Image (cartoon, rainbow, N blue to C red):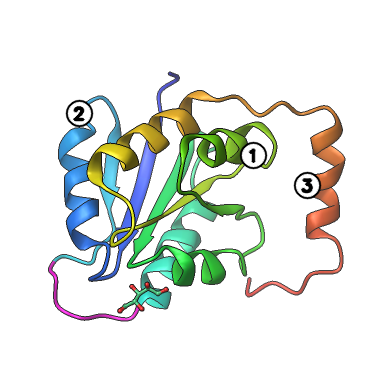
Amino acid sequence: MQYMTLLIAADHGGYALKQAIIAASTTLTCVDLGTHSSDRVDYPFYADTLCQQLIESPSNTKGILICGTGIGVSIRANRYKGIRAALVHDRVTATMASAHNNANVLCLGGRTTSVETALLLIHDWLNTPFEGDRHINRLHQLDADVRYLV
Ligand code: RB5
């Protein structure tokens, strides 16, 4: 895998999984953007924090967002121009998120996905190249006529 920086953020529903991913990611540079405890917080803030930083980051940077289900953070993240956030649950969707959608943010559910599965999904997402070709035009179509937050 090429050198990669991972921004990672979670709400309280994803806090434990975030900590486990950081602990297991010994060969990656992880930048922990919070939350820093299991106290209840609001997930849009953490999605905003990560997306705003990712947009300003070099291209070898990607993001992982985690809330209880992964749904809330994925909805918010996709409101940013340049963010393609994919909520994945299995190795097929994790692989396709890269191969077909060139997703730069992976969304996970801290209450729906085990640590072991999450690590496999992250591995597949990071190690699958974007296929380009016919998918490039589809990504342009995804961005057409959209009003973004920024
Ligand atoms: C918080 O209880 C929960 O709603 C949040 O983590 C997430 O699952 C929202 O989509």
Whether the magenta-drawn stretch holds residue 38 is answered as yes
The reply to whether the C-beta atoms of the residues labelled 2 and 1 are less than 8 Å apart is no
- Magenta residues (range): 37-42
For label 2, count other residues whose C-alpha is less than 10 Å away and answer few (under 14), some (14-19) or many (20+).
few
Q: Earlier in the sequence, mark 2 or mark 3?
A: 2
For residue 145, the mark is none
According to the image, label 2 marks what residue? 26
Quadrant of the image occupied by residue 16? bottom left
For residue 139, the mark is 3
Q: Quadrant of ligand 1?
A: bottom left
Residue visible at 40% across and 23% down in the picture: 3
> In the figure, 142 relative to 25: above or below?
below
For label 3, count other residues whose C-alpha is less than 10 Å away and answer few (under 14), some (14-19) or many (20+).
some
For label 1, count other residues whose C-alpha is less than 10 Å away and answer few (under 14), some (14-19) or many (20+).
many
Q: Quadrant of the N terminus?
A: top left
Three-letter amino acid code of the residue under disc 2: Thr
Three-letter amino acid code of the residue under disc 1: Asn
> In the figure, 85 relative to 60: above or below?
below
The reply to whether the C-beta atoms of the residues labelled 1 and 3 are less than 8 Å apart is yes
Residue visible at 48% across and 52% down in the picture: 54
For residue 102, the mark is 1
Residue 10, image x and y in percent? 30, 63
Residue 53, image x and y in percent? 44, 57
Badge 3 marks a residue whose secondary structure is helix
Residue 103, image x and y in percent? 59, 44
Q: Is mark 3 within 8 Å of ligand 1?
A: no
Badge 2 marks a residue whose secondary structure is loop
Residue visible at 78% across and 47% down in the picture: 139
Horizontally, residue 132 falls left or right of residue 51, namely right
Three-letter amino acid code of the residue under disc 3: Leu
